[in-house]
Amino acid sequence: MGTGQRAGSGEEKRACNERAVGVSILQGYFEPTRKTFLVTYEQFLEQKKVKISPSGFDVDELDLNKALFPFQRYIVKKALHKGKYAIFADCGLGKTLMQLEWAHMVNLHSGGRVLILAPLAVSGQTIQEGEKFGIKVSHYGKGAIQITNYEQLDNIDPSLFSGIVLDESSILKNFTGAIKQKLISMFADMEFKLCCTATPSPNDPEELGNHSEFLNAMTRNEMLAMYFIHDGGDTGSWKLKPHGHKYFWAWVSEWAIMLCNPADIGFPMDGYDLPELKLIEKKIITEKRDTGDLFFNQTAVSATNFNQELRLTKVERLSEAANIVNGSTENFIIWIKQNEEGEELKRMIPGSVEVKGSDTIEYKEKMLLGFANNKFRVLITKTKIAMFGLNYQNCHNQIFASLDFSFEGLYQAIGRSYRFGQDYPVNIWVITTDTMTNVIQTIHKKQKQFFEMQNEMNVSMNPETHRKEKAPRVPEVVETDLYTLKLGDCVTLIKEVPDESIGFSVFSPPFAELYTYSDELEDMGNSKDYKDFLFAFDFLVKDLYRVLWSGRNVAVHCMDLPIQKGKEGFIGLRDFSNMIRQSFEDAGFIYHSRVTIWKDPVTEMQRTKALGLLHKQVKKDAAMSRVGLPDYLLVFRKPGEHKHPVQCAIPVDTWQKYASPVWMDINYSDTLNGRSGRDENDGKHIAPLQLQTIERVIHLWTNKGDTILTPFLGIGSEVYKAVEIGRKGIGFELKQSYFKEAVKNCIAAMNVAKTEKIF
């Protein structure tokens, strides 16, 4: 069968590739009946920007409630246009009025009812706010705009509504997984959705991911795969890919707006000055306990002995709180951690009311709303009960009688009083003891991190930021008689390579989700999932088939990759090597050979902290233990008449070593030094392919003078070794800092080659 016929057959196979057809991310990219690509590579890159099409409707700002400030009208108009939207606005910026007007306009537009879900007692405040601004809100079961508590979720029929509002939508994070998933699934098909909450925690991608999934923007798993990496050895903690900040916040701004004050989105600050915040720390020196030879009590507590320490210091802390409250006639909120603290404080403070978890829903709502309406002077409760949604501007005094390690709890609780619209300085008493010094230190550290990252979010999501287009990449070409190096996207640059002109190709592709080396859309590591990666990779493989000599080989270095529980809910392995094989076979290549390259599992365990490689897991439950992950070298051959036979002059003992299916002798430290090629935003270390591996495959599958192509040049390892041993090289690299390092390395290789010719 001729080469042209095989190539055509391969293209047909590739075009109707079933692993791409029907997959959500690639819907519309293929039409199975025609067996051809329906988009160009450029169109595919444009779709990688993850733009979200509006699904709402437009209104004239003049038709919106006259009580809205200009910045609020702007936000409501945008939320209605988007159809599914999130308002992340700090306390006191009028989220309640904005969500009420949004619900009112959705009702007028659709003719359907709108449901507001709110934390306990917030529903009562929302009804009162509606009355103030001429918007009628009713309890669940009647009216155009209905409101109920999250606790009533099981009694709700979503089919009765056209729109849903999640008030204090950070509850998506704080509720259990089952409740969170119920909210997402119950309202998956709702036409109009709005989420309202204060600025989400910058350190918690879960909150943004759950919002995104609720609003049908992207699933949590897709978000983590595209924009986040594990935070070191802690596989349950995520952080933004250093190169992904720009695209991540641009994507979030497609479905959300975030502001701490009107100026963040370009509006004047008139009337939005926060009052003075007075943080008053009261440290109690405890009596000496029996602690052995120590002169003082321990000054640090842990999460395990925290509650015990609270009980040991209860009398001193609560007495201090009671003295502060009893010495004043103003309203106070006292935040506690344990039920016995509430009982003691009620006894010590006449007329105080405690709201605790075991109270009935009706009692909780009545008392929490009663405090807002000045029915009593002192409220005693826990942050997990009342830190969300409630407006307690009537109170500018709070006491934290029991402080734990949660900065979020402290921040949200303070926000009940310290908010735009508060007329008085807010006094926050924090009662600590000398045995809990590390608690306040932890809070200060988290506070600093929070405000630094909150500022980054606000700056990134300012619309003006995203109007600044990135400067176009300046093409760079370095060409000698031994090599050609080009800066740019390999999928584009390979089109400049003539047909049937390459003798061999060797490379290690970027591992989707795992390594991201740049913020370029063309970076295949910037992929939402493996199907997205493979779609771009297929464009490259198609042209690799075109440029390679018939009968010659391509060697691809790869490995199988761990499936992470934090992303997909289970621990396992992804058969990445098989995905690569499938891509080459679909392009018409023949699967020629596979080499397993041994790696030390102890080194892997120390680097990744993988559960399956820990010895303690063998003793705990060996069913979850696994072997280490080797590297693979996959070799593919282009079919057709081979007009350039390879004369490999290696001795028989060397051939026997090369012919082994497992290469045990590859030195993993034998690489070009890539440190100078890194930049400050690199999220992972550069891992150049071992020079021994490159040298071995070039000796085995090429002749001197052949041209060797690497589409992922990196710091130049493949071209360096090709030139050093008498071949020519072509390399493409997307990242400028790597490209510069590759140029230096290839100059060094050329000098070595010329020196060898002289001698």
Image (cartoon, rainbow, N blue to C red):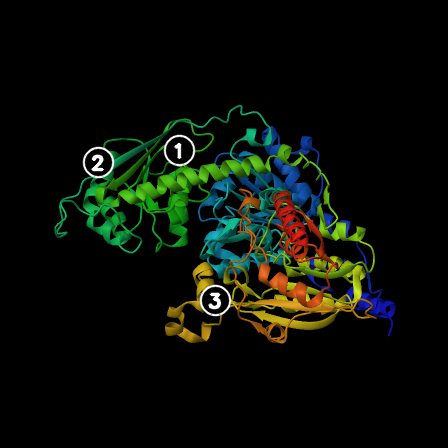
Counting residues from the start of the chain, the first of labels 2 and 3 encountered is 2
Q: Are marks 2 and 3 in contact (CB under 8 Å)?
A: no
Expressed as whole percent of the image width and height from the top left, the position of residue 448 reads 41, 38
Residue type at mark 1: give it. Asn
Residue 394, disc = 1
Q: Secondary structure at mark 3?
A: loop
Report the amino acid beneath label 3: Asp
3D distance between C-alphas at marks 2 and 3: 64 Å
Residue 135 appears in the figure: no
The answer to which image quadrant residue 620 occupies is bottom left
For label 2, the SS is helix
Where residue 533 appears, as percent x and y from the top left, is: 67, 58
| Horizontal relation, residue 356 to residue 524: left or right | left
> Which numbered mark, 1 or 3, is in the foreground of this view?
3
Q: Which residue is mark 2?
A: 323
**Picture disc at residue 600:** 3
Counting residues from the N terminus, which is met first, the one under dot 2 or under dot 1? Answer: 2
Q: CA distance from mark 2 to mark 1?
A: 21 Å
Quarter containing the N terminus: bottom right
Amino acid found under the numbered disc labelled 2: Asn
Outermost residue, top side: 270
User: In the shown orientation, is residue 258 left or right of residue 594?
Assistant: left
* Residue at position x 80%, y 63% in the image: 549
Q: Residues within 10 Å of mark 1 (few under 14, many from 20)?
A: some
